[in-house]
Image (tube, rainbow, N blue to C red):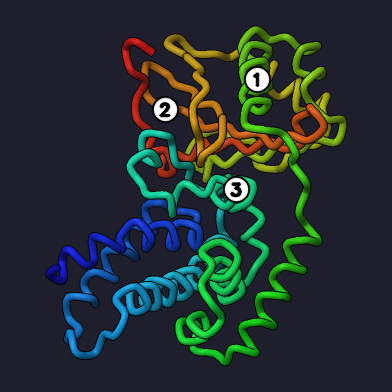
Amino acid sequence: MNRVETFSQHQPLLFAIAYRMLSSAMDAEDMVQETFLRWQAVGAEEVRSPKSYLSTIVTRLCIDRLRSARAQREEYIGPWLPEPLIAEETTDMTEQLALADSLSIAFLVLLENLSPVERAVFLLRDVFEYDYAEIARIADKSEVNCRQIARRARRHLAAREHRFDASSEEVERITRRFVLAATNGDIAGLLGLLADDATLWSDGGGQVASAINPVYGAMNIARFFIGLAKKTPPGFAARVASVNGQPGIVTYVNSQPESVITGEIAGGRIRAIHIVRNPGKLQRVPPLKADA
């Protein structure tokens, strides 16, 4: 197996790590490409384990990118949400990317509470199941330190994590009911699906009209969607799709993606809604097919 073939064998894993680190498919691809360039430049005699070497490079690149991205996000207009992945993209990935629990928008939002190093150690250990000796080499820290970092990361996440107990089938059923209620302007139907303390976040990135602040409470969220229904443009369509491994909604105008919506469900009610409208984060969303 030559060097290009070796890299290709590990490329899905590298993208899976990078996407979970950065919550951006575009940035993840950049990190994987930079890893490839460094892989090509290193002598074969310097590499004992291609997987370990490549994982080290991509993780360290992502840590550096996250540190610079955090400063930029302080100037971001409105809530910052991850770039969504739609089914047509994820079906081409290996099982490394198909770990739905660690791919959901809600999980990626949760990871934003961690420092770059905490995020790396947590993902490598709890998602990708690297042993602490290997994580220590990747993070350039001691095993003891890595264990401490992992425990600290778990505590941070546990303090903020909500338990969304719905099965994929229940999520899809509720999502389809939500689409009907929202597109028909059915406020009673929306209120019947939303938890009283639900919260909505919308990411327009200052590029398109979007809620700058989170929307709190079932009634306010229902009114938000009723307002959208009243302003539906010609050529509008909404479809249920697989978003980051879970049922979600893609809306279109004239067959071009306008937004991606995901909801988190517990106790049969929607407790959180994330809407991505920033056009820069929708570039990978495929247009609506004519027969859809």
Q: Badge 1 local density, few (<14 within 10 Å), some, or many (20+)?
A: few
Residue 50 in which image quadrant = bottom left
Marker disc for residue 173: 1
Task: Choose mark 1 or mark 2, whichever is in front.
Answer: 1
Q: Residue at x 34, y 65 (%)?
A: 31
Instruction: Determine whether 44 is above or below 70 in the image.
Output: below
Q: Amino acid at mark 1?
A: Arg
Q: Tag on residue 101?
A: 3
In this figure, which residue is indicated by the disc labeled 2? 257
**What residue is shown at x 40% (from left), y 51% (from top)?**
25
Going 72% across and 41% down the picture, which residue do you hit? 214
* Comparing labels 2 and 3, the label whose residue is closer to the camera: 3
Of labels 2 and 3, earlier in sequence is: 3
The quadrant in which the N terminus is found is: bottom left
- The structure residue drawn at horizontal position 62% and vertical position 60%, both measured from the top left corner, is 111
| Kind of residue at badge 3 | Asp
Residue type at mark 2 is Pro
Q: Is residue 63 at all visible to an observer of this figure?
A: yes
Residue 264, image quadrant: top right
Question: For this rendering, which residue is in front, 276 or 85?
Answer: 85
SS at badge 2 = strand
